[in-house]
Image (spheres, grey):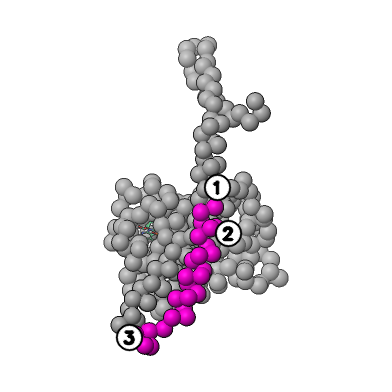
Amino acid sequence: DPGMRLSLRLLPYSDDLWLLLARDVSKLLRLEHMRRDFVANVSHELRTPLTVIHGYLEMLDADDHPEWAGLLDEMRRQSQRMARLVEDLLTLSRLEARDQLAEEHVAMAPLLATLRREAEALSGGRHRIRVEDEAQVDLRGASKELHSAFGNLVSNAVRYTPDGGEITVRFFRESDGSAVLAVRDTGYGIPAAHLPRLTERFYRVSTSRSRESGGTGLGLAIVKHVLGLHGAQLAIASDVGAGSIFSCRFGRDRILPRDPHLSSPPV
Ligand code: ADP
């Protein structure tokens, strides 16, 4: 059967005997594909009605019915939240369906400048934002996806840091030749017990804090997938009450010399 997929395990049995276990995982993989397609289809189908609702809500104004003002605001807020959720679900299922991404020269200087602008806009002056570009190299990868992954980390740092805190984006080289993009905040921090599950879809330390701050619960799952497609690793270190550091490590094979001509920001 050409469609059959086997998962193999070789186990030591005795001195000179090995046990080869073969498990038929075809059904498991088919189910996983169905789940992925279903989520992608539902998200896609939800887009159009949401756009319509959103459009009509924008047209309604509460001039004749002042008592509706708060109600309309809340409806707009919730429909925006739902739109963000649908977009994140679509992004995630697109990433899950890929074995690799089209690669290009990712210019890091303009990308870091864009991240700074986005952090400042999200923060609205409530945090100190610092960007330290020490690596002086670029990366080989998918610009749009990397931008979205780093952007999610920056947005989390802003959203989980009380006013007056500090967010630092640092791009540096390690002695082994790898390059690291680290996002550090002085925010709430994360209890150690939660760290292993943080990148699971919809896993949250505090559901109410995440909702209030506009989270979809999918940000870190997207980060993990994008980094995985780049052979990069995510490391999380956190101290409750002191803050967190999310580090994305790229191997030497991902590093390109900085190209001074590539100065336009990624789209
Ligand atoms: P959300 O949309 O809920 O922020 P994410 O996948 O981006 O979803 O993050 C998952 C959870 O990890 C968050 O709900 C939050 O509890 C925790 N988290 C993520 N980033 C940070 C951070 N910088 N500081 C504290 N907690 C964080």
Residue designated by label 1: 37
Q: Secondary structure at mark 1?
A: helix
What is the C-alpha distance between the residues marked 1 and 2?
20 Å
Mark nearer the N terminus (1 vs 2): 1
Q: Nearer the viewer, mark 1 or mark 2?
A: 1
Q: Nearer the viewer, residue 26 or 163?
A: 26
Q: Position of residue 162 (x, y in %)?
A: 32, 70
Residue 157 x %, y %: 41, 65
Task: Check if mark 2's residue and mark 3's residue have beta carbons within 8 Å.
Answer: no
Q: Is mark 3 within 8 Å of ligand 1?
A: no
Verify CB contact (< 8 Å) between mark 3 and mark 1: no
The amino acid pointed to by label 3 is Pro
Q: Which badge, 2 or 3, comes first in the chain's sequence?
A: 3
Q: Does the magenta portion include 13?
A: no
Q: Which residues are magenta?
A: 41-66
Asked if residue 52 is among those painted magenta in the image, a careful observer would answer: yes
Question: Which of the two discs, 2 and 3, sits closer to the camera?
Answer: 3
Amino acid beneath label 1: Asp
Rendered image: mark on residue 66 = 3
